[in-house]
Image: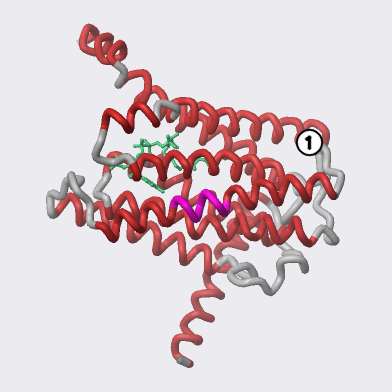
Amino acid sequence: MEMVEGAWKAVDMRVTQLVWGLLRNVMGVELTGTPTTKGLPLIDSPTPIVVAITIYLSCVIGGLLWIKASNLKPRAQEPALLQALVLLHNLFCFGLSLYMCIGIIYQAILNRYTLWGNSYKLEQTEMAILVYMFYMSKYVEFMDTIIMVLKRNTRQITFLHVYHHSSIALIWWIIAYHAPGGEAYFSAALNSGVHVFMYLYYFLAAVLRGNEKVRRKYLFWGRYLTQLQMFQFGLNLLQAYYDRKVHAPYPPFLITILFYYMISLLVLFANFYVHKYVMSSPKGKQKTSKAE
Ligand SMILES: CC(C)(COP(=O)(O)OP(=O)(O)OC[C@H]1O[C@@H](n2cnc3c(N)ncnc32)[C@H](O)[C@@H]1OP(=O)(O)O)[C@@H](O)C(=O)NCCC(=O)NCCSC(=O)CC(=O)O
């Protein structure tokens, strides 16, 4: 036990030095932490989230290698345990997202937030706890990719997906550690709202698996969901632009991260949208074959 504790302390020191150094040299910032979330599980140092992301990436790479080496294909009939896991995970994420979305909007109203340009205040403890909860939900969302691996759905394990899941977790640790409130409320509420629909979509996709005709009939709105996600990134980008222009009272480096991160997601999602809905549509396929 002492050995494990000693090893953890050594890793913690190294990782903290690395993250602190990166933030100082790349962004010119010193993270101070805030008493509101101090002492809560997995928040006081960057090590837990960095270790979690490392384990996550190892599982994804290991999973992909295993699928490729064993030449595994998605199964027509999946094991009952996997089906149950997928349904439970989506139901849980659906409920949690709904709770966080409503909770954050309620706290924003109580604290008289405006749409954009809000500062983080120490006394807004309930808002901070909800933002912390949003950060914790990123650990749960790693399960999305584990589900893709277990389902052998390599088509879903894209750069977009893995980049999103690993980077967003680190970003929300920084926010929950440094400024869990103010302008962060907007992304957290909006993204939780979008995730209510996303996890409902994934839940229905899992329930209706095996009957493609029915599934297509009830999941026709997948395309609109992707549009909603892109609209969300567009709104966040506008928010970052606005906050930079008016010098909003929120840590400027977090606004800069938001700005560039949203551009990257918009580009990746636009590429996903074109491939999934435009190029694979009958018209899109015709166009591509004519061009060939
Ligand atoms: C419609 C989308 C929500 C999802 O697009 P997909 O191409 O993944 O959709 P799909 O129709 O193939 O999904 C159906 C398959 O997903 C399986 N499935 C069920 N639950 C799942 C879960 N929790 N995570 C991953 N896959 C899951 C179903 O069983 C089914 O598998 P089978 O076919 O075998 O039966 C899209 O808009 C999107 O987000 N695409 C980007 C890809 C992505 O990774 N998105 C999520 C993270 S990004 C994100 O979250 C952005 C944000 O914050 O808004």
Q: Amino acid at mark 1?
A: Leu
Quarter of the image for the N terminus: give it. Answer: bottom left
Mark 1: which secondary structure? loop
The answer to whether residue 271 is visible is no
The image quarter in which residue 80 lies: bottom left
Closer to us: 153 or 50: 153
What residue span does the magenta drawing correspond to? 90-96
For residue 171, side relative to residue 34 (left or right): left
Which residue is the site of mark 1? 115
The relative height of residue 216 versus residue 76 in the rendered view (above or below) is: above
The relative height of residue 266 versus residue 45 in the rendered view (above or below) is: above
Q: Is residue 93 magenta?
A: yes
Q: Which residue: 17% across, 46% down?
A: 73
The image shows residue 89 at horizontal and vertical percentages of 43, 55
The image quarter in which residue 186 lies: top right
The image shows residue 266 at horizontal and vertical percentages of 52, 30
Q: Which residue: 27% across, 44% down?
A: 154
